[in-house]
Structure formats: structure tokens, C-alpha cells
Amino acid sequence: MSSIPVFAWTASANNASLAAALCNFAAATITKAPLANALNCTIPSAETTGTILRHAHDLQLFLAKRDRDILYKYELNRPGNIIFLVIFTLIASFNLFMAFRSKQKWYNICFITGFVLEQVGFIGRVLGFMDNQKTMYYAMQSLCLTVAPAFIMAGIYFLFAQSVAVHGRQYSLLKPMWYSYFFISADILSILIQATGGALLSDGGKSQEKWGDIIMFVGILIQIVAITIFLFFWFIFLGRTFFHDRDSIPAHCSYRKKSALNYIKLLLNVPSAREYKLGHLDAFYNPKYQSIRFRTLYSYYPLALSVAVILVYIRCLYRVVELKMGFDGYLMSHEVYLFVLDSVFIALTGFVFIPFHPMFVFGRDNVLTKKDIQESDNSIPQQFVFHEGNVDREKDFAFAAERREEVLLRTLL
């Protein structure tokens, strides 16, 4: 009875399924030997079959150990990582350039920090091309790409407070600066926790790696909770700017009806909605910042902020699921999801704030500082008082009509 040659397995083998197939083949030849003899077929000897089984088992152990030792769980995609490095370098450079032109200090600091961290993260991944086993490169990309969105959100939180001041305190559930205090504090806590997790990952030990994943998971979870609460307050605020004064708007205006469709139209700033906001609603907003509200970009500003926050929110949800699945999970072991569900969303957020940079939206000299926001909280103009009764209602209509004529005239000019 003849036998087959024994294969010499080397480290070049890269498919664990091959070893499993060999094990199944060897087992099948033993169980089906009588059938093979009946068909006058040649089968391996028992000694050869045993050798195949041993080598296949050794190959499985080798491949499993090799996969555990690889930090990235995949071969880094060179074109993809280089493309995102270039994209985030451009976005970071734009924000750095704008820092010298605009006076939005807090926004500039937060966005520059956030996108520079994205840039550094992809520098770490590109360096990983040369040595994908170097822990420093891995920790560099892991920590930077994880915490970067927290800095971006910190800038957006302050923009929310500015928006409250531009429209009026009566439209907000909380005082405008409270949003900054609460959400930025949550962001700082999230960053510190994620940084602690990243430090444990950089240690390189298996036990530290496990705890690093858990701690980073908690940090991102805190960030998601904060963004969820933020979205609640944000959309409530927008709804109030749209419908709070509807009882003082003439009955023939269709947008005074509180409905989801009108909400969406007003948020999207369709032409009829824009005319309604400038011709009717603006009469009830803070007159101090009317010049800002009449800027074309500001009409689309709430939509831009909403899109940006939702993009970051989806990215954070992906990160939570990824860390929940673990270091050996499906998402962590497939680079395409990092590109599609993380980097693309953060890059889009950066692109949103290129045309909607606060300097372009508010104007170079219209800078709302912390002091301005606090002053808008303490003073409510007379026209913001909500009247009751027919006489006062008539006053509201007359006042709104007067302001509406002014607005329409300015629009035509």
C-alpha cells in the first residue's frame, strides 16, 4: 500500500482553514478506508495519516499564535491610510490657517486639537507599514483616533451656547453657558478615561490590553450619553425657535402649525421657510444679533450643526460596538469599518465646518464671547414677553407686522 509525501509547513502559510481542511482530509481517509479498498483506490498509510494530523495541528497552533501577536489583526491598507492622512492634514491645516484670521478662540482650539489628533493617528498607522508590531505606533493611532472627536464636540457645544444667545434665552431649556459647562465637563471626563485606556494599551501586556479596551469602552460610552442628551436639548431648542411664538403669527401662515413636516422644512431652510423665519419669526428674536441672523449662511447653520453632531454620534456608536465585540471581534479585525464608520464620518464633519466656520457664519467681527452669552441670559427685550388677552395679542400682531415689513424691505435690498 503506497503513502503520500509529508509536507513541510513553514511560516509562509497564512490560512488557518488550510490546516483544518488537512485535518478533515486525514480523518476522512481513515473512516472511509474500507470503501476506498472496495473501489481499488490508493490511500495513505496509517503512519502517514498520523503525521499529517500532527503537522496540521502544529500549523493551526502556529497560525493562532501569529494572529494573537499581530496588533492590527489585518494587513494595513496603504492607499486608504495615506488618503485619510492627506484628508485630515488638509482639514487640520485649514483650521490652523483660520485661527490666524478668526477670533473664535475656543472653537479654533478645539477643532485644531481634534483634527491634528486625527492626523497624528493616521501618521501612526502609516508608520505601521514599516513595523506593524511596534506597540508605540499602535497606541499612537488607537488613542489619537479614539479621543479626537471629543475635542471636536467640545467646540460644537460652545456653538450651541452662541446660538442660544443669537436667538434668545426664552427658547432654551437651560441657561446657554450651562450647555458648555455640562457637556464640556463630560467631554473632559471622557477624554481622561479614554487616555487612561490608551495608556494601558501601550503597555503591551495582555492583561493591560484587556483592561485598556474596557476603560476606553466606558470613556466612549460617556461621550455617547453626553451627545444623546445634547441632541435632545438641541432639537428642543430648534423647535422652540420655530414654534414658540406661533400664537402671535397671523393665522394664514402655514408654518405656524406645529408639525413634523414644518419642523423639517424650517430646519432645511427651504425658500418659503426662510421667508417665514425672516419675515415673521425674526421679530421675536434677540434684536442685538439681527445682523447675524440676516447673513445667508446663518439660515443654514442649524442644519449644518445638526448634521455634524449626528455624524460624530454615528461614529461613536460604531466605536462602542467595536470595543464591545472585543479586540478579536469582527469590526476590530476588518479595517474597512474603521474607514467607513469612523474616518469618513469625522472627515465629513470637518468638511461641514469649512463653509460653516463660525467666522463665515457670524462675520469676522461678530464674536460672541462668554461674557456676551451671559449678558444675553440676564436681559430679555420687551418684545420677548409673552402676552395674554386680546389687546396684548393685537399689540403682538402689530409689532410683528412692523418688523416683518422691515425684514422684507431688507431682503429686497
Image (cartoon, rainbow, N blue to C red):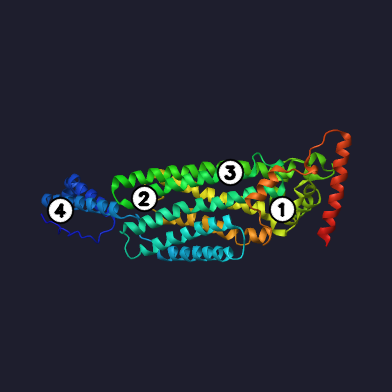
Number of the label disc, if any, that sits on residue 199: 2
Q: Secondary structure at mark 2?
A: helix
Where's residue 374, x and y in %?
Answer: 66, 46
Q: Residues within 10 Å of mark 2 (few under 14, many from 20)?
A: some
User: Is there CB contact under 8 Å for labels 1 and 2?
Assistant: no
Against 11, residue 146 (above or below) is above
- For residue 348, say whether it is visible: no
**Distance from Cα at disc 2 to Cα at disc 4:** 54 Å
Q: Nearer the viewer, mark 2 or mark 4?
A: 2
- First-in-chain label (3 vs 4): 4
Q: Amino acid at mark 3?
A: Phe
**Distance from Cα at disc 1 to Cα at disc 3:** 22 Å
Q: Residues within 10 Å of mark 3 (few under 14, many from 20)?
A: some
Q: Residue at x 25, y 62 (%)?
A: 12
Q: Amino acid at mark 2?
A: Ala
- Residue ID for mark 4: 44
Q: Amino acid at mark 4?
A: Pro
Q: Nearer the viewer, mark 3 or mark 2?
A: 2
Number of the label disc, if any, that sits on residue 230: 3
Q: Nearer the viewer, mark 4 or mark 1?
A: 1
- First-in-chain label (1 vs 3): 3
Q: Residue at x 10, y 54 (%)?
A: 1
Q: Residue at x 57, y 60 (%)?
A: 351
Q: Secondary structure at mark 1?
A: loop
Against 232, residue 105 (above or below) is below
User: Is there CB contact under 8 Å for labels 4 and 1?
Assistant: no
Where's residue 321, x and y in %?
Answer: 44, 45
- Residue ID for mark 1: 269
